[in-house]
Structures are given as C-alpha cells and as structure tokens.
Image (cartoon, rainbow, N blue to C red):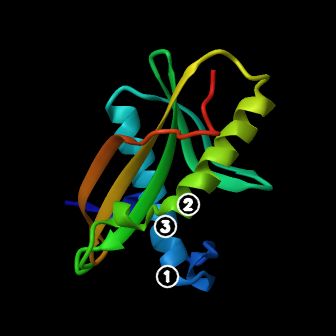
Amino acid sequence: MKSLRGFLKFDSESNHSEKPIHLVRGELGEKAAEKHLISQGLIFLMRNFKSKRGEIDLIFRDDDCLVFIEVKTRSSGSWTRPAAAVNAEKKRKLTRAAFDYLTMIKRPQIKMRFDIVEVILAGDQIQEIRHLPVAFNLTKPYRYG
C-alpha cells in the first residue's frame, strides 16, 4: 500500500489542515489517480476543469481518444463501491462539462470517453486504485461527432 503522505505536503506551510477531511482525501485521490493513469501510459492534459455546467476531475489522452475522468475516493469501510456515487445527474454534469471543454478547444473531431477511477483508502494508506474505462456512454441528445 502507498502512503498518502507522498502525495501532499503535511507541514506547517500547507493550508490542508484548514480544509475538511473529505476535501483533503478527494485531492489525495485525484493525485493518486493521476499518477496511476500516467503509469498506465495515458497522457495528462488537465486537472479540475470547471465550467458553468460542471467540473471534470482529470482529462487525459489515450492514443486518439480524449478521456474525461471522474475520481471517487472512499475509505475501505464503505458499503458500496465509489463508482456507485456517479448517478444520472452527475453523468449529465460531466457530459455538459466535457462539451464545454470541447468547445474551448475548438470542437475537434476526436473520440471521447468517460472513465471513473476509484481510490480506496485504509487510514492514510492507498489500499486500491481501480480504473474503470468507458464507465458510461453518451445518450441522446448528448452524442458528439
């Protein structure tokens, strides 16, 4: 298991002690997911893209495909898998934010997909990182290309 301490500084200069613990864990999960995906050969493009219609945790490129990543971090004592938190409303927000990103980069003709990365914590240790490619598909009226 990897320790979370390698992903963020836990010192007096850090303002993370002022943040709620769920936000700190979320940031740690995103950093762990980013490192994991890079180690799998994906090319990192952007972190925490925000638009008026939603937010995307991570954006990567996988060969000729743009990959929008939702990261879900939970403690190991949770009853359900973290991906279960990505409900229909969250999928709509991710889809809309992805279209806003595509508009920002001038709407290229490119493949795209939505992945989820689950990060499971046991105390301050990363117990598991699970990448779920193509976690959901676009439905009408959200088809692209």
Name the residue carrying label 3: 26
- Residue located beneath label 1 in the image: 21
- The front one of 57 and 53 is 53
Q: Horizontal and vertical percent for residue 91?
A: 54, 54
Figure disc tally: 3
Residue at image location 63% in from the left, 55% down from the top: 93
Q: Residue at x 58, y 78 (%)?
A: 12
Q: What secondary structure is marked by label 3?
A: helix
Looking at numbered disc 1 in the image, what kind of residue is underneath it? Ile
Label 2 Cα neighbours within 10 Å, binned few <14 / some 14-19 / many ≥20: some
Give the residue drawn at x 19%, y 60%. 1
Q: Amino acid at mark 3?
A: Gly
Q: Which is nearer the eye, 48 or 84?
A: 84
Residue 63, percent across and down?
45, 16
Nearer-N-terminus badge (3/1): 1
x, y percentage for residue 113? 48, 33
In primary-sequence order, the first of circles 2 and 1 is: 1
Q: Is residue 9 visible?
A: no
Disc on res. 48? none
The residue where tag 2 is placed is: 90
- Image-quadrant location for residue 125: bottom left
Instruction: State the SS at label 2.
Output: helix
Extreme residue in the front direction: 140
Which mark is nearer the camera, 3 or 2? 2
